[in-house]
Image (spheres, rainbow, N blue to C red):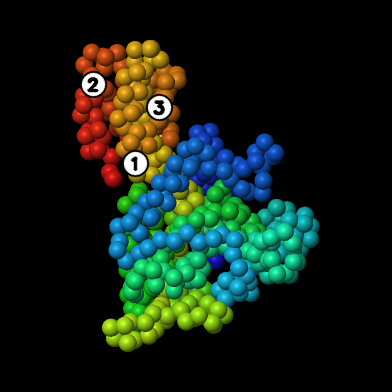
């Protein structure tokens, strides 16, 4: 765990309150427009868990799909897996999580709140008291029982990272795909950590999604591939719309490195509260394969039949959070401007991440317009994620689509019945052009990147 927060501005200064405001607006928008809801809200919420609503599920899927496309689909040296979340204690014994995956927990003796000692500098953030207990190691893994009997033999853990799934399936993947280093195994899925203080909306939650690659290389090529992945991952965030001045790489000092790591760097985003981690990229050496080999008795190594060489590969790991990354894209995209003398809020999301790429809007609910609008919807739905909205005035519907980041609106009006053409409106410029229905797919293809 390697998260650093650099505070920007003291409480009360103008910059700090502006940033606080931005965070509040994004959180409000997420709830109001159906991106992210507090979980079990009808029961007062449940311990910092969140549910992804109709728009959130579309956007989160886009974030994960873009990652998969760049890390798996566009490469011939990476394959995917989807490993079990419920996992054997042996995995976590070998990986070191049972012994080491802990945070230092302290209790405030005054108000009885519990905190992560390394995050609070000796003072309880709730009541200001510095009368704290000595820190004790608190293991972050969720423990449960697989089977009807709650006994030691049935203990299972909810995985705290997806990475170990790649190590324990290393041999099977090698044998079934006939890959040879350098090659990678990728996985996207839920992970669970019993965080002491979940915070900052979906930045740190107990249930979250990760996107991880374990890239196996000959040991003497470790450093080269580590640097290669730093470049690849930075480009991925920039390409999808994180501004360059809000993204940076931070190399870990030797004293900060995890026990398995020869080198680590974090990709950091400038969140409203300061620079913080989106992704960790590590050279994990041969630590994990050797640890699993030792405990399982299996030989987890690569044998090169051509040269007769046998070795345990080094692993380069770019490990990102999908839910956290989605939040960063929402914050980076949030904007306000003025259109026709009216203030508007909008998400300047890259079309590839936006929940809807297009909205089809019949000018009115008139019986003659809706069938044509539905015809247009039918043309576009196989190609893009499309909203269809007939409620309220057209101006209000444009604002609603702007606010959820829909890059293009297609309006069907009474003239459309005569000229078989529609109006295409751009979210960012609000410019409108008239396009024949016959040429609409081609027009949108030209404006929406694949
Ligand atoms: N396999 C290495 C690993 O899991 P990590 O730095 O602990 O490394 C990788 O996690 C990424 O997963 C983080 O950079 C972050 O984006 C995301 N992540 C970790 N803990 C999280 C949490 N409690 N809530 C949301 N995202 C989290």
Whole-number angstrom distance, CA of label 2 to CA of label 3: 18 Å
361 left or right of 210 in image: left
Q: Position of residue 281 (x, y in %)?
A: 43, 67
| Residue at 38%, 55% in the rendered image | 68
Nearest to viewer (mark 2 / mark 1): 2
Whole-number angstrom distance, CA of label 2 to CA of label 1: 23 Å
Sequence-first tag of 2 and 1 = 1
Whole-number angstrom distance, CA of label 1 to CA of label 3: 17 Å
Q: Is residue 415 above or below residue 15?
A: above
Callout 2–callout 3 Cβ contact below 8 Å: no
Q: Which residue is mark 1?
A: 351
Sequence-first tag of 2 and 3 = 3
Helix, strand or loop at label 1? It is loop
In front here: 75 or 382?
382
Q: Quadrant of the N terminus?
A: bottom right
Can you see residue 79?
yes
Q: Which residue is mark 3?
A: 388
| Residue at 28%, 83% in the rendered image | 306
Few, some or many residues within 10 Å of mark 2 (<14, 14–19, 20+):
many
Q: Position of residue 298 (x, y in %)?
A: 50, 80
Residue 394 sits in quarter = top left
Image disc number at residue 325 = none
Q: Which residue is mark 2?
A: 421
Q: Position of residue 100 (x, y in %)?
A: 61, 73
Callout 2–callout 1 Cβ contact below 8 Å: no
Residue 181 sits in quarter = bottom left
Few, some or many residues within 10 Å of mark 3 (<14, 14–19, 20+):
some
| Residue at 32%, 52% in the rendered image | 239
Q: Is residue 128 above or below residue 379?
A: below
Callout 1–callout 3 Cβ contact below 8 Å: no
In front here: 232 or 246?
232
């Amino acid at each position: 765990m390697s998260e650093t927060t650099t505070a920007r501005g003291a409480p009360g200064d103008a910059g700090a309150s502006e940033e606080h405001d931005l965070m509040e607006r994004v959180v409000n928008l997420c709830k109001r427009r159906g991106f992210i809801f507090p979980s079990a809200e009808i029961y007062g919420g449940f311990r910092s868990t969140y549910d992804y609503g109709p728009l959130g599920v579309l956007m989160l899927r886009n974030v994960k799909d873009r990652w998969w496309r760049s890390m798996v689909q566009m490469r011939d040296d990476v394959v995917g897996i989807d490993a079990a979340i419920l996992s054997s204690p042996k995995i976590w014994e070998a990986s070191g999580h049972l012994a080491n995956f802990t945070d230092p927990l302290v209790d405030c003796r005054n108000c009885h709140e519990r905190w992560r000692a390394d995050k609070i500098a000796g003072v309880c953030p709730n009541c200001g008291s510095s009368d704290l207990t000595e820190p004790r190691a608190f293991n972050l893994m969720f423990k449960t029982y697989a089977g009807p009997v709650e006994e030691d033999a049935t203990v299972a853990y909810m995985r705290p990272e997806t990475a170990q799934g790649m190590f324990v399936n290393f041999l099977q993947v090698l044998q079934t795909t006939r890959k040879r280093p350098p090659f990678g195994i990728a996985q996207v899925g839920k992970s669970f950590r019993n965080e002491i203080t979940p915070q900052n909306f979906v930045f740190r939650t107990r249930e979250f999604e990760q996107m991880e690659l374990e890239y196996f290389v000959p040991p003497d090529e470790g450093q080269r591939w580590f640097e290669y992945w730093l470049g690849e991952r930075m480009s991925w965030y920039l390409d999808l719309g994180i501004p360059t001045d809000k993204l940076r790489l931070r190399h870990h000092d030797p004293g900060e490195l995890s026990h398995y790591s020869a080198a680590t760097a974090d990709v950091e985003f400038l969140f409203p509260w300061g620079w913080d981690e989106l992704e960790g990229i590590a050279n994990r050496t041969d630590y994990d394969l050797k640890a699993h080999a030792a405990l399982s008795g299996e030989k987890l190594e690569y044998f090169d039949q051509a040269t007769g060489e046998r070795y345990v590969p080094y692993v380069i790991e770019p490990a990102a959070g999908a839910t956290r990354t989605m939040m960063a894209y929402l914050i980076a995209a949030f904007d306000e401007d003025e259109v026709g003398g009216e203030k508007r809020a909008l998400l300047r999301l890259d079309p590839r991440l936006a929940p809807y790429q297009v909205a089809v809007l019949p000018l009115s609910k008139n019986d003659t317009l809706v069938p044509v609008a539905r015809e247009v919807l039918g043309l576009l739905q196989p190609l893009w994620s499309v909203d269809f909205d007939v409620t309220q005035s057209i101006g209000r519907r444009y604002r609603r689509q702007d606010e959820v980041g829909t890059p293009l609106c297609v309006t069907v009006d009474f003239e459309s019945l005569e000229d078989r053409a529609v109006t295409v409106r751009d979210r960012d410029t609000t410019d409108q052009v008239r396009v024949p229905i016959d040429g609409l797919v081609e027009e949108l293809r030209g404006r929406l990147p694949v």
